[in-house]
Each structure stands twice: as structure tokens, then as C-alpha cells.
Image (spheres, rainbow, N blue to C red):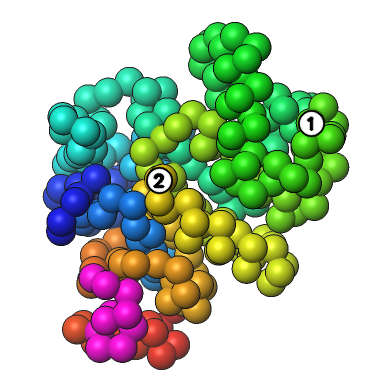
Amino acid sequence: MENTILKIENFNVYYDTNHVIKNVSLAFEKNKITAIMGPSGCGKTTLLRAINRMHEFTPHARTEGNIILNEKETSVNIMDLDAIEVRRKIGMVFQRPNPFPTMSIYDNVIAGYKLNGIKLDKTKEEETVSKSLKKAALWEEVKDSLHKKGTFLSGGQQQRLCIARALAMQPEILLLDEPTSALDPIATQFIEELFTELKKDVTMIMVTHNMSQAARISNNTAFLYLGDMVEYGKTKIMFTTPIDKRTEEYLIGKIG
């Protein structure tokens, strides 16, 4: 693929003896949204978590293969980097909004810096907060209540706060694990529009069980089934003329 920012090569994930991801190879385009789809239990979230090394929080998880991040002038295997550095380059937004409950909106946005022991001067801190909240389309709604707790916000606002928190670290890639599944349709539409805008600045890889969502906002789609990469390509083409019978059966609801 042209303009590849991340390449997964012959990648396997095991939990003990359970082979969850099976020799997957995949390339992600810079400044595009890629959807990863498939039935429950097919390995979507496992693959997503492995991209920023979060699988390491699961006991007895191990991987084989490479995940290569193409930066401006260098390529690096993220398996060779410190995991904290990887998570600064590759942020993550989870299924349920999870602002830190004891922190203010302001402190939630810069939490990544504080948790990693990175000191910002007051001016830089304030600039990071306002810039990140603006990027997450939340600034106008919260600018007068930055020191209130993030948990007072609505579900959709909380998810945008979590997006702002991830963006504050200036990642190159944002991983999205079913980011709207806990939200109502109006909040979902707002966040989908936000992602479409954000791809100018950041590459997004999104796990979704929502085929309509993938069709609406993703540029490319990967279909995983029982840990295998069945099919990968342009979303419009895959949704109209899938190559593999299993993809077709998933899209029409025969499997899943």
C-alpha cells in the first residue's frame, strides 16, 4: 500500500497454548481510517491491543512476528521499543469512556504526561489542554468548567475527553476499540464526524462490529475470522464485491 505508516508482518498472538492471531500480515495507510471487522472472539481486539503492546498486561500472552512503524525517516519494530514509548506514539481509545474519575477535565487531558513523569511548564500545559480539547471538538462545551471532574460529562462528551487525552500525547496512530458502542446514535454520529476530521492529523485503526459504521467512515477494511486475516482492501470494494466467500457470508449476516 502507498504511504504505509504501520506494517504487521507474519504476526501471531498466543494466550498459553491458544493461538489467537494466526500469521497475520497487514499494512495501514497514513491519514486513513482502517476498520477491523469480524465476529465476536475472532481476535480483533487482541490484534488492536498488540499494536501498542497492551497484550503484555494479559498473563501468558506472547507474540511472534514484527510490527513496523514507519516514522518520518526511519522504520522501527515496535517490539524492540520500550512499551511506554510505543504507547506515546500509538494512543488508544476504549469501548467505554474511561476518564480518570478523581481528576478534573484539565488533568484528564494531560494525564499521559503526568503518568509518564514528563514535566510541562504551565504555558505548554495550558496550550496542550486547549489544543487537544479543540481537536476533540469539546473545547467550547467545557472551557468554562475545566476544573470540574470529567465524570460529570455526558457519555459522548466523556468519550471525546478520552480522545483529547489520547491526542494530547501527539500520537501518530490512534487505536479505537469499538469507540461508539456504548453511546447513543446522536453521540455516535458526532464522534464519527470527528474521526473523519481527525484523520488529517492522525492515522486511525478501528475495531467495530458495526458494519454500517465501517461503511460510513473507513477507507479500508480488514476482515478477521477465527484469527485469520481473510480479506483486506478498500472498504467500498469489499462491501460491494468481496473476494472471499466468508467475507460475503459475514456481510450478509450468515456468520457472526
For label 1, the SS is loop
Residue 26 position (above or below residue 84): below
Quadrant placement of the N terminus: bottom left
- Read off the magenta span: 233-242
251 or 151: nearer the viewer: 151
The residue that mark 1 highlights is: 146
Does the magenta segment cover residue 88? no
Q: Is residue 54 left or right of residue 194?
A: left
The residue that mark 2 highlights is: 202
- At horizontal 45% and vertical 32% (from top left) the residue drawn is 170
Q: Residues within 10 Å of mark 2 (few under 14, many from 20)?
A: many
Q: Is residue 215 left or right of residue 223?
A: right
Q: Quadrant of residue 72?
A: top left
Location of residue 25 in the rendering, given as x and y in whole percent from the top left corner: 17, 55
- At horizontal 73% and vertical 50% (from top left) the residue drawn is 157
Residue type beneath disc 2 = Val
The secondary structure that most of the magenta stretch takes on is helix
Visible residue check, residue 60: no
Q: Earlier in the sequence, mark 2 or mark 1?
A: 1
Residue type beneath disc 1 = Leu
